[in-house]
Image (tube, helix red, strand yellow):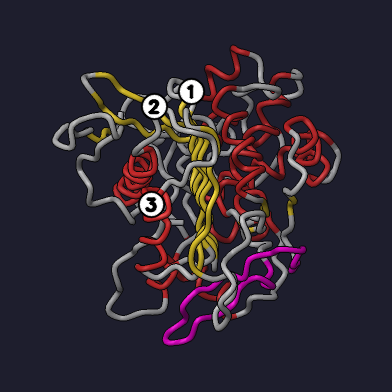
Amino acid sequence: MTNNITSTARRRLGITALAVALSVGVATPAAAGQDRPELRDAIQTFVDVGFAGMQLRVYDQRGGWVGSAGVRKLGESAKPPTNGRFWVGSVTKTFTATVILRLVQAHKLHLGDTISEFIGGIPNGRQITIRELLGMTSGLPDFPTQYVKPIFRYPQREVAPLKFARRAIKLGKVVKPPAPFLYSNVNYILLGIIARRVTGENIHASYAKLFHRVGLGHTEFHSRPVLPKHMAHGYVKQHAHQSDTAHRNFSPWWTAGAMISTVGDLAKWAHAIATGHHLLNPRLQRARLHIPTGSIYGLGIFRAQVLKAGKRVSFFGHNGIVPGYDSMILYSPARKITIVVLGNTSVGFDTFFSKPKPPDPSLFNAFGSLACIALHPDVSPHARCALNQQ
């Protein structure tokens, strides 16, 4: 939820490092079902730095592997089930972006349409386009810190999405578009409202069509307190107390972050959004994956790259963090590698309640200090991969 471009880029690059870390050992053929100690060690590392529980699913040349570490609920010994449901935070943005892009594909919207055609009273609304909302270049601010803290104090409070967005814009700094990349949840709340007004239907219905197209049987959109079967408990540390957030109201994040899913469903989804399969025509898929110079973000999707032997290997996906949950999905079209990681502790939010601020060992930063990581087990341990923004 940061609104600092440098911090945001740093966090996304942390995901690049994680992608490579989890890709170690993916190229050597092995028997189906073979144990993957390097993957087990990777998720155990997260538990060691503060996550209550983790799930990981990987598809690569060895086939599929899924595992978990830690506990499903603090105070108990049971590990998180590998079919457990998690709040996936900003991975929701990939669904919202796809709804919008499919409306463009159906000629019900244009990427050059402006906010003012659908929502009045937004600063620069006659200049900010759908494309700029999708690509985080609208110049609209993210939720300011002073607006986030009350969300924690009143976890069951219902929030009207448009009212919440207007308030955040009023409290933040607005930059005239086209603006530099600035990660903002406000953009995706406005996109949800636009989708609802264009279709004339509840946003749940728009998402349900995507679930059906891709075969996501365990993914749901919920902005109100809910605890489906196999729902993972989520924890955020408020001062010295670990608060369970599974039953909280996620309406403040709405179409920017209120989706629930599983590692299995998200593996399908990661492939779909990176390839456009069952979702978008080739022209719109190319537009989605186009990364402007100096950025790492396309239209509701980021790109993380690894430089190996002078060639860049791209992963496309998204990460997410909401109170109690941390998530990441990645797919490499060139290597056909799928990586999904879910954690039931949002250690990144601890910084809101701690003085001095602790280190942030969230999913995007857990491997951020690694400058070079071996990509394949059949390569000399001295051969390294360089991490790149571009």
Taking depth in this image into account, of 273 and 33 the one nearest to the observer is 33
- Do the residues bearing badges 2 and 1 touch, measured as CB atoms within 8 Å? yes
Q: Amino acid at mark 1?
A: Pro
Q: Residue at x 69, y 75 (%)?
A: 156
Q: Amino acid at mark 3?
A: Phe
Query: From this viewpoint, which residue is outermost toward the left?
Result: 382
Mark 2 and mark 1 lie on one chain; the one further toward the N terminus is: 2
Mark 2 and mark 3 lie on one chain; the one further toward the N terminus is: 2
Q: From where the camera sits, is residue 168 visible?
A: yes
Q: Secondary structure at mark 3?
A: loop
Q: Is residue 136 above or below residue 281?
A: below
Q: Quadrant of residue 225?
A: bottom right
Image: magenta residue range: 225-249
Residue 333 numbered tag? 1
The magenta stretch spans residue 233 = yes
In the image, 8: left or right of 79? Answer: left
- Do the residues bearing badges 1 and 3 touch, measured as CB atoms within 8 Å? no
Q: Residue at x 35, y 40 (%)?
A: 16
Residue 124, image x, y percentages:
53, 39
Q: Quadrant of residue 279?
A: top right
Q: Amino acid at mark 2?
A: Ser
Q: From where the camera sits, is residue 169 visible?
A: no
Q: CA distance from mark 2 to mark 1?
A: 8 Å
Position of the C terminus by quadrant: top left
Q: Quadrant of residue 254?
A: bottom right
Residue with the mark numbered 3: 364
Residue with the mark numbered 2: 314
